[in-house]
Amino acid sequence: MKRIFSILMVLMVFVLMSGFAFLAEDGLQFADLSSVLVWFAVGGGAMWLFGIVEARLLENIVFWHKLKPWIKKLVPIAFAGLVGFLAQSLIAVDITQYLPEGVAAILLAAINWYFSQREYGLIKESAYGSSARAG
Protein backbone atom coordinates (compact mmCIF):
# COMPACT_ATOMS: atom_id res chain seq x y z
CA MET A 1 0.00 0.00 0.00
CA LYS A 2 2.87 2.40 0.77
CA ARG A 3 4.31 1.77 -2.69
CA ILE A 4 1.03 2.83 -4.32
CA PHE A 5 0.98 6.06 -2.29
CA SER A 6 4.59 6.73 -3.27
CA ILE A 7 3.79 6.31 -6.96
CA LEU A 8 0.69 8.49 -6.66
CA MET A 9 2.68 11.19 -4.87
CA VAL A 10 5.33 11.20 -7.61
CA LEU A 11 2.61 11.52 -10.25
CA MET A 12 0.94 14.30 -8.29
CA VAL A 13 4.23 16.19 -7.99
CA PHE A 14 4.71 15.93 -11.76
CA VAL A 15 1.22 17.29 -12.38
CA LEU A 16 1.71 20.11 -9.88
CA MET A 17 5.08 21.07 -11.37
CA SER A 18 3.56 21.30 -14.83
CA GLY A 19 0.74 23.30 -13.30
CA PHE A 20 3.14 25.74 -11.68
CA ALA A 21 4.73 26.26 -15.08
CA PHE A 22 1.27 27.17 -16.36
CA LEU A 23 0.66 29.54 -13.44
CA ALA A 24 4.06 31.20 -13.80
CA GLU A 25 3.05 32.34 -17.27
CA ASP A 26 -0.01 34.37 -16.28
CA GLY A 27 -0.11 34.31 -12.50
CA LEU A 28 -3.67 33.76 -11.37
CA GLN A 29 -5.31 36.14 -13.81
CA PHE A 30 -7.26 34.07 -16.28
CA ALA A 31 -7.92 35.32 -19.80
CA ASP A 32 -10.89 33.07 -20.50
CA LEU A 33 -12.84 30.18 -19.00
CA SER A 34 -10.79 27.66 -20.96
CA SER A 35 -7.68 28.72 -19.04
CA VAL A 36 -9.60 28.21 -15.78
CA LEU A 37 -10.50 24.68 -16.88
CA VAL A 38 -6.88 24.00 -17.85
CA TRP A 39 -5.81 25.20 -14.39
CA PHE A 40 -8.25 22.75 -12.79
CA ALA A 41 -7.15 19.94 -15.12
CA VAL A 42 -3.36 20.26 -14.84
CA GLY A 43 -2.49 23.42 -12.92
CA GLY A 44 -3.11 22.42 -9.35
CA GLY A 45 -6.59 23.92 -9.27
CA ALA A 46 -8.15 20.62 -8.24
CA MET A 47 -5.85 20.30 -5.22
CA TRP A 48 -6.47 23.95 -4.35
CA LEU A 49 -10.22 23.32 -4.49
CA PHE A 50 -9.92 20.30 -2.22
CA GLY A 51 -7.79 22.33 0.19
CA ILE A 52 -10.62 24.84 0.46
CA VAL A 53 -13.21 22.08 0.93
CA GLU A 54 -11.08 20.38 3.57
CA ALA A 55 -10.24 23.54 5.48
CA ARG A 56 -13.71 25.04 5.47
CA LEU A 57 -15.95 21.97 5.51
CA LEU A 58 -14.32 18.66 6.40
CA GLU A 59 -12.25 19.94 9.31
CA ASN A 60 -15.49 21.00 11.01
CA ILE A 61 -17.08 17.55 10.75
CA VAL A 62 -16.34 15.03 13.50
CA PHE A 63 -16.67 12.13 11.05
CA TRP A 64 -13.64 13.35 9.06
CA HIS A 65 -11.40 13.19 12.14
CA LYS A 66 -12.47 9.63 12.92
CA LEU A 67 -11.34 8.30 9.54
CA LYS A 68 -8.14 6.29 9.25
CA PRO A 69 -5.10 8.28 8.09
CA TRP A 70 -4.73 6.34 4.83
CA ILE A 71 -8.31 7.23 3.89
CA LYS A 72 -7.60 10.91 4.57
CA LYS A 73 -4.61 10.64 2.24
CA LEU A 74 -6.53 8.88 -0.50
CA VAL A 75 -9.56 11.20 -0.55
CA PRO A 76 -7.65 14.31 -1.78
CA ILE A 77 -5.96 12.29 -4.51
CA ALA A 78 -9.28 10.82 -5.67
CA PHE A 79 -11.04 14.20 -5.44
CA ALA A 80 -8.32 15.95 -7.44
CA GLY A 81 -8.42 13.18 -10.03
CA LEU A 82 -12.19 13.49 -10.41
CA VAL A 83 -12.08 17.29 -10.67
CA GLY A 84 -9.23 17.10 -13.17
CA PHE A 85 -11.10 14.49 -15.20
CA LEU A 86 -14.24 16.62 -15.17
CA ALA A 87 -12.30 19.72 -16.23
CA GLN A 88 -10.60 17.79 -19.04
CA SER A 89 -13.99 16.49 -20.18
CA LEU A 90 -15.38 20.02 -20.25
CA ILE A 91 -12.36 21.15 -22.28
CA ALA A 92 -12.89 18.28 -24.75
CA VAL A 93 -16.56 19.17 -25.16
CA ASP A 94 -15.62 22.87 -25.44
CA ILE A 95 -18.21 23.89 -22.90
CA THR A 96 -17.40 27.55 -23.37
CA GLN A 97 -19.13 27.60 -26.75
CA TYR A 98 -22.43 26.75 -25.04
CA LEU A 99 -22.22 29.52 -22.46
CA PRO A 100 -23.64 32.92 -23.38
CA GLU A 101 -20.94 35.58 -23.50
CA GLY A 102 -22.48 37.48 -20.60
CA VAL A 103 -22.41 34.43 -18.32
CA ALA A 104 -18.83 33.65 -19.30
CA ALA A 105 -17.80 37.24 -18.59
CA ILE A 106 -19.49 37.24 -15.17
CA LEU A 107 -17.89 33.89 -14.21
CA LEU A 108 -14.47 35.04 -15.34
CA ALA A 109 -14.81 38.37 -13.51
CA ALA A 110 -15.84 36.58 -10.31
CA ILE A 111 -12.91 34.15 -10.50
CA ASN A 112 -10.37 36.89 -11.18
CA TRP A 113 -11.89 39.07 -8.43
CA TYR A 114 -11.54 36.23 -5.91
CA PHE A 115 -7.86 35.70 -6.69
CA SER A 116 -7.14 39.43 -6.72
CA GLN A 117 -8.69 39.76 -3.24
CA ARG A 118 -6.45 36.99 -1.98
CA GLU A 119 -3.41 38.92 -3.18
CA TYR A 120 -4.83 42.17 -1.80
CA GLY A 121 -5.18 40.53 1.63
CA LEU A 122 -1.55 39.43 1.56
CA ILE A 123 -0.44 42.94 0.60
CA LYS A 124 -2.63 44.50 3.27
CA GLU A 125 -1.15 42.25 5.96
CA SER A 126 2.36 43.33 5.02
CA ALA A 127 3.81 46.69 5.94
CA TYR A 128 2.50 48.27 2.71
CA GLY A 129 0.75 51.50 3.60
CA SER A 130 1.42 51.17 7.32
CA SER A 131 2.64 54.76 7.62
CA ALA A 132 -0.65 56.06 6.19
CA ARG A 133 -2.71 53.84 8.49
CA ALA A 134 -0.72 54.89 11.56
CA GLY A 135 -2.08 58.31 11.05
Image (spheres, grey):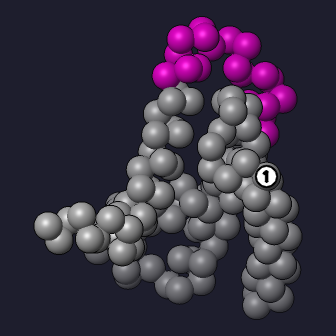
In this picture, is 128 found above or below 107?
A: below
Q: Quadrant of the N terminus?
A: bottom right
Residue 106 horizontal/vertical position (percent): 49, 22
> Is residue 8 visible to the viewer in this orientation of the structure?
no
Q: Label 1 sits on what residue type?
A: Glu
Residue 108, placed above or below residue 30: above
- Answer whether residue 91 is visible to the viewer in this image: yes
Q: Residue shown at 53%/16% (left/top)?
A: 103
List the residue tagged with mark 1. Answer: 25
Q: Between residues 120 and 43, which one lies in front from this camera angle? A: 120
Above-or-below relation of 35 to 101: below
Residue 7 in the image, given as x and y percentages of width and height: 85, 80
State the image coordinates of residue 6 (x, y, percent, origin top left): 80, 85
- Residue at 14% x, 67% y is 135
Residue extent of the magenta highlight: 88-106
Q: Position of residue 124 (x, y in %)?
A: 35, 64
